[in-house]
Amino acid sequence: MSKFAKKKDGELPAVSTASLPDIVFMLLFFFMTVTVMKDSSLKVKNELPVASEIKKLEKKDRVITIYVGAPDAQYEKVFGTEPKIQLNDKFSSPSDVGDYILMERAKKSQELQNVLTTSLKVDKNANMGIISDIKLELRKVNALKVNYTTGSGDAFNNLK
Amino acid sequence: MARRGGAPEVSAGSMADIAFLLLIFFLVTTTIETDAGLDRMLPPIEPPDVDVIIKEKNIFQVNINKNGQLLADDNLIDLKDLRAKAMEFLDNNGDASCTYCKGKKNPESSDNPQKAIISLKNDRETKYSTYITVQNELVGAYNELRNREAQRLFKRDFVEIEAEYLNPETKDKLDETAYDELKEKVKRIQELFPQKLSEAETSSSN
């Protein structure tokens, strides 16, 4: 009799959580491998346009990034709503771009200094005027290899 | 009494919490990068020593105004037609010196792909997204022609060959001769349709 009674009073057996750490570790390793550390926090709106004929930017150590876009909502009061250039962590004017490139170039090792690419991450609502200014500055310091960084997709979606 | 069975087991119950903490830390501090885009070379700032004389028919003028309208060789065209127009221009083969071209041999258009230059001009108020779309279409025109030649010669798309060549892992995977062969293929196709896309300084319209 007691044999049967024992089974009845038992509640649902607890789900074993012994493998939970393993699962979480798996997730952890996934994120550690596919992501990279943020090197600067974005202060501008940066919605990239899309293009279909894109090439992958290999080797992150050979890339210098310039962000362009309208200042974020929290900076709007101080910096207005016109697209601005962000170098490292601060807003800059086009005339600072040359110095910035030279500074970043000096930080890289000798053999990389001639193969650097400048990645332009420009918000799709920016005007070409500011881009032209940047391009002129880049040409002045002989940083001729640029990459207009975009998402992938049908380019005609940009026009909508 | 002496302890039997060695040291007591350490509780692993908090392992999950520790792992979660780490996981959240990585989620917050990292981003998944968008690292692809259109590669372009800017012209050097010093003007070339010798003035190169280029015939007008070898230049394909593309102008984008501030409203995003497109003027290609003095005709107002739709952005969707740009790729076909550019391909027609590059592939024209006016002097019949290009053996692989399939163009119309229109004497009013470009002599051969080596001489054909696409010049892109934009206004200061052109929207960046429009500019990228135009760039994309022009690069697309080159890529399509290059793909055609690569299919003919190597039975593969040029874009695919180039991506393999640019991938840093390829160098380790292939032995030296195979890698050189790949490089040779990329170069050969690039020479058939050299990318001559000039980006003139922007004009400001009033």
Image (spheres, helix red, strand yellow):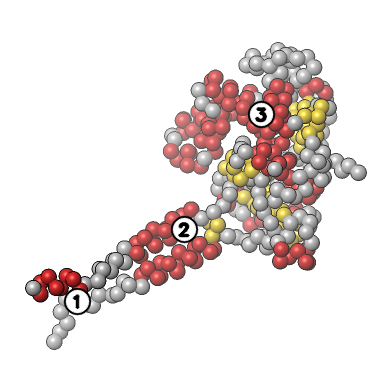
Residue that lies at the very extreme toward the left in this rendered image = A1
* Circles 3 and 2: CB atoms closer than 8 Å: no
Identify the amino acid type marked 2. Met
Note whether B183 is above or below B205 in the view shown: above
Few, some or many residues within 10 Å of mark 1 (<14, 14–19, 20+): few
* Circles 3 and 1: CB atoms closer than 8 Å: no
First of labels 3, 1 by sequence position = 1
The disc at residue A32 is 2
In three-dimensional space, the C-alpha distance between marks 1 and 2, rounded to whole angstroms, equals: 36 Å
Judged from the image, the secondary structure of the residue bearing numbered disc 1 is loop
Identify the amino acid type marked 3. Ala
Q: Position of residue B6 (x, y in %)?
A: 19, 76
Residue that lies at the very extreme toward the bottom in this rendered image = B1
Note whether A107 is above or below B170 in the view shown: below
| Residue B183 can be seen, yes or no | no
Few, some or many residues within 10 Å of mark 3 (<14, 14–19, 20+): many
Judged from the image, the secondary structure of the residue bearing numbered disc 2 is helix
In three-dimensional space, the C-alpha distance between marks 3 and 1, rounded to whole angstroms, equals: 74 Å
The chain identifier of the residue carrying mark 3 reads B
| Residue A86 can be seen, yes or no | yes
Identify the amino acid type marked 1. Gly
Name the front one of labels 1 and 2: 2
Quarter of the image for the C terminus of chain A: give it: top right
Few, some or many residues within 10 Å of mark 2 (<14, 14–19, 20+): some
Residue tagged 1:
B6
The chain identifier of the residue carrying mark 2 reads A
Residue tagged 3:
B141
Q: Position of residue A2 (x, y in %)?
A: 10, 75
Tell me the residue at 71%/66% (across/down).
A74
Q: Horizontal placement of A105 versus A98: left or right? A: left
